[in-house]
Image (cartoon, grey):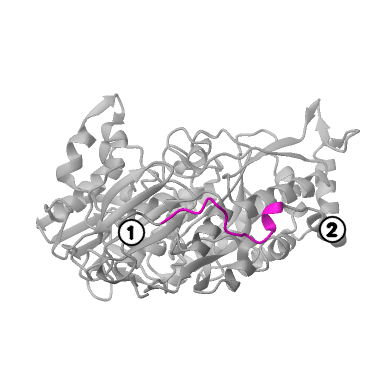
C-alpha cells in the first residue's frame, strides 16, 4: 500500500513546479521610494488580502499582519516564544506581584507606558477598558470573546494603571488585549446600531483606515494591490528605523517569486515550499526556515449527517498518509501533526501519534461496518446516498491544492468521493457570512496560527460555536467542555499539562478535525533588510518591524 501512495504522488505533475523566471509583468518599486538610509521603505508580501483592519472582528492571519504595525497591545510575543511588554511597563506575573490569586478569581495589574494614538490623543487606561467593552458587546461581531468573558470588571485608578478583575483564575491572561482601540474615535460607532443587534463598529470607516498607537501609521489601502504605512515619530518604544512599509498583496506564488528576484519585494513571507530550491539558490536572499506552532488540518463539519458517524471520520484518518504528504509535497520540512498542540509545547502528548497509522485496509473495513457499500464506480453509497464530500480551502496556495488532489486520491481508494471547491480567503474566513462561520462546508483545509499558550477553548468548547467563537466543526463533548474550562482555570504548568494531555487523547479519539502537518515557515528576505526576526507564533513577523532597517 505504501508503494501505491508513493506512485500516486509521483504521478501528479504541475507546471508551476518548474523554476520561476522573471517575465514582462515585473512591477517597479513605488515611485519616489527611497531604497536605503533613514528614508528607506520595505515591501512585504502578503498572499491574502485582509477582510478588515479591525483585529477584534477578523481572525485572518493577513489581518493580524496588516494591523500589527499600526496597533499596540499590552503584551506581545518575541521570536523565542517569550511574552514581552509592549504598552505595559512589565509582564505581570505571580512572582513579580502583578498577578494576585484569590479565592474567587485573580487580579492582574498593568502599568502603562506613556503612549499616544496617531492623532495625538493620549492612550490611557480608559482605552484598555473600552477595548474590553468592545469584546463584550453582543452587538459587536468579535471573532471570540474567550478570556474577556472571564473578566468581572476593570478599574482605572489613574491614566497609567489598569486593574483587571477576573471571575476565576485564567491561565492565558497574557493573550488578551493584543490590540488597544481608541475610545475617543470608536465609542460612538460601538453605541450606534445600524439595525438591532448590529453595532456600527462592525462596519465603521475606521476598519479600513485605522488609527492606532503602533510604530507605523496607516497611509492607504488600495484593494487588491497594497496597504502602505508611514513611520510614527511619536512612537513610545524604539523609534522605527524605516520611513515606511508596504504590504503588497500578491496571491500568486510564482508572481511573488518573480518580484522577490527582481527586487520589487524585500520580504516574501510564508514562501511556497514548491520554490524551496529556487529560493535557496537566489543570490542576495536569506531564506529563514522557522519551525512554527501553526498547523495544517482538515475540519469535519459535524452538522453533516454522514460526518457525524465516527467510523467515517476514522476511515478518512486511516486513509491519509501524512508522512507521504510531508515528504512528497512539503519536502520533509512540514512534519506530520497528530494534535492541535505542537511538539514544541510543554503540554504535548506524544501518545496520540500512534492513533491513526496509514491503513487503508482498516479504513475500508470501518466503512463496510458502517453500511457504506462500493458502487460500480468504486464510490460507496447507502440508502441511495453517495459517500461524497466537498473539500474547501483558500485559492492560490499550490501545496494545499496539491494536498487536496492527493487527499482526493487517498479517499477514492477507500470508496469516498472528494470534490475540490476552493474560495478566496475572505469567503472562507469572513464574518459573519464566511463558509466556516455559517457552516456551509463539508471538509475545510486550512491552518491555525497559535500562541505559546495551550488554551484551545475557542476551538472545542460547545459554547464557542459561531457566532460566539471559532468552533467551526460544531463539536460538542461535555468532558471537553469541562477540560477546556479547567485548563484555563489554573496558572500551574503541571496541572495544565495533565489537562491538555487528556484533551489531546479525547480529540484523537473523536476526530472533530484531522491534524495534518506542522508548518516550517519559509521567509525569504533581501540581504539589504536587517533586523528581521521571524516569529513562530500568532504574533507574526511584524512583531518587531520598528527594528527593521536597510543597508545597501
Q: Is residue 467 above or below residue 275?
A: above
* Quarter of the image with the N terminus in it: bottom right
Q: Is residue 237 magenta?
A: no
* Quarter of the image with the C terminus in it: bottom left
Residue 89 found in image quarter? bottom left
* Mark count: 2
Q: What element does badge 1 sit on?
A: strand
Q: Residue furthest front?
A: 24
478 left or right of 332 in image: left
Residue highlighted by disc 2: 7
Magenta-tinted stretch:
15-28
Q: Is residue 198 visible?
A: yes
* Mark pair 1, 2: CA separation: 45 Å
Point out the tag, 1 or 2, that comes first from the N-terminus: 2
- Between 311 and 69, the residue placed more toward the observer is 69
Q: Is residue 492 above or below residue 314?
A: below
Residue highlighted by disc 1: 245
* Residue at 45% across, 43% down: 464
Q: Is residue 216 above or below residue 93?
A: above
Q: Is residue 21 magenta?
A: yes
Residue 533 found in image quarter? bottom left
Amino acid at each position: 500500500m505504501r508503494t501505491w501512495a508513493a506512485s500516486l504522488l509521483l504521478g501528479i505533475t504541475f507546471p508551476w513546479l518548474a523554476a520561476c523566471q522573471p517575465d514582462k509583468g515585473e512591477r517597479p518599486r513605488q515611485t519616489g521610494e527611497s531604497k536605503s538610509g533613514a528614508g528607506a521603505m520595505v515591501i512585504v508580501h502578503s498572499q491574502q488580502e485582509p477582510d478588515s483592519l479591525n483585529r477584534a472582528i477578523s481572525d485572518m492571519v493577513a489581518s493580524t499582519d496588516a494591523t500589527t504595525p499600526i496597533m499596540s497591545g499590552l503584551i506581545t510575543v518575541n521570536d523565542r516564544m517569550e511574552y514581552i511588554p509592549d504598552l505595559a511597563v512589565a509582564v505581570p506575573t505571580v512572582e513579580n506581584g502583578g498577578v494576585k490569586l484569590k479565592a474567587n478569581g485573580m487580579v492582574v495589574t498593568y502599568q502603562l507606558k506613556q503612549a499616544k494614538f496617531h492623532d495625538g490623543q493620549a492612550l490611557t487606561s480608559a482605552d484598555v477598558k473600552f477595548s474590553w467593552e468592545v469584546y463584550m458587546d453582543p452587538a459587536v461581531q468579535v471573532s471570540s470573546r474567550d478570556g474577556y468573558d472571564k473578566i468581572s470588571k476593570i478599574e482605572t485608578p489613574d491614566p497609567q494603571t489598569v486593574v483587571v478583575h477576573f471571575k476565576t483564575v485564567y491561565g492565558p491572561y497574557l493573550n488578551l488585549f493584543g490590540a488597544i482601540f481608541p475610545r475617543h474615535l470608536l465609542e460612538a460607532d460601538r453605541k450606534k446600531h445600524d439595525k438591532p443587534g448590529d453595532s456600527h463598529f462592525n462596519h465603521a470607516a475606521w476598519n479600513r483606515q485605522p488609527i492606532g498607537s503602533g510604530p507605523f501609521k496607516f497611509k492607504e489601502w488600495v484593494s487588491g494591490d497594497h496597504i502602505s504605512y508611514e513611520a510614527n515619530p511619536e512612537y513610545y518604544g524604539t523609534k522605527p528605523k524605516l520611513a515606511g512599509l508596504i504590504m503588497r498583496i500578491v496571491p500568486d506564488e510564482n508572481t511573488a517569486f518573480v518580484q522577490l528576484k527582481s527586487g520589487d519585494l524585500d520580504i516574501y513571507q510564508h514562501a511556497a515550499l514548491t520554490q524551496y530550491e529556487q529560493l535557496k539558490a537566489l543570490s542576495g536572499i536569506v531564506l529563514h526556515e522557522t519551525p512554527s506552532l501553526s498547523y495544517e488540518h482538515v475540519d469535519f463539519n459535524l452538522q453533516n449527517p454522514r460526518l457525524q458517524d465516527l467510523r467515517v471520520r476514522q476511515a478518512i484518518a486511516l486513509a491519509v498518509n501524512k508522512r507521504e504528504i510531508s515528504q512528497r509535497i512539503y519536502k520533509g520540512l512540514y512534519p506530520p501533526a497528530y494534535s492541535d498542540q505542537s511538539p514544541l509545547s510543554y503540554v504535548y502528548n506524544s501518545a496520540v501519534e500512534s492513533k491513526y497509522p496509514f491503513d487503508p485496509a482498516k479504513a475500508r473495513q470501518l466503512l463496510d461496518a458502517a453500511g457504506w457499500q462500493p458502487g460500480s464506480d468504486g464510490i460507496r453509497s447507502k440508502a441511495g446516498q453517495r459517500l461524497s464530500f466537498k473539500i474547501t480551502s483558500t485559492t492560490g496556495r499550490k501545496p494545499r491544492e496539491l494536498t487536496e488532489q492527493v487527499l482526493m486520491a487517498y479517499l477514492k481508494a477507500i470508496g469516498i468521493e472528494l470534490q475540490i471547491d476552493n474560495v478566496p480567503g475572505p469567503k472562507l474566513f469572513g464574518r459573519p457570512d464566511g463558509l466556516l462561520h455559517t457552516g456551509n462546508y463539508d471538509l475545510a483545509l486550512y491552518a491555525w496560527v497559535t500562541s505559546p499558550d495551550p488554551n484551545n477553548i475557542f476551538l472545542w468548547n460547545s459554547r464557542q460555536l459561531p457566532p460566539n467563537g471559532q468552533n467551526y466543526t460544531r463539536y460538542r463533548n461535555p468532558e471537553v467542555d469541562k477540560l477546556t474550562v479547567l485548563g484555563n482555570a489554573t496558572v500551574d504548568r503541571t496541572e495544565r499539562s495533565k489537562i491538555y494531555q487528556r484533551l489531546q487523547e479525547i480529540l484523537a479519539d473523536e476526530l472533530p478535525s484531522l491534524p495534518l502537518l506542522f508548518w516550517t515557515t519559509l521567509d525569504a528576505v533581501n540581504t539589504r533588510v536587517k533586523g528581521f526576526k521571524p516569529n513562530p507564533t500568532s504574533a507574526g513577523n511584524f512583531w518587531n518591524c520598528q527594528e527593521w532597517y536597510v543597508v545597501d
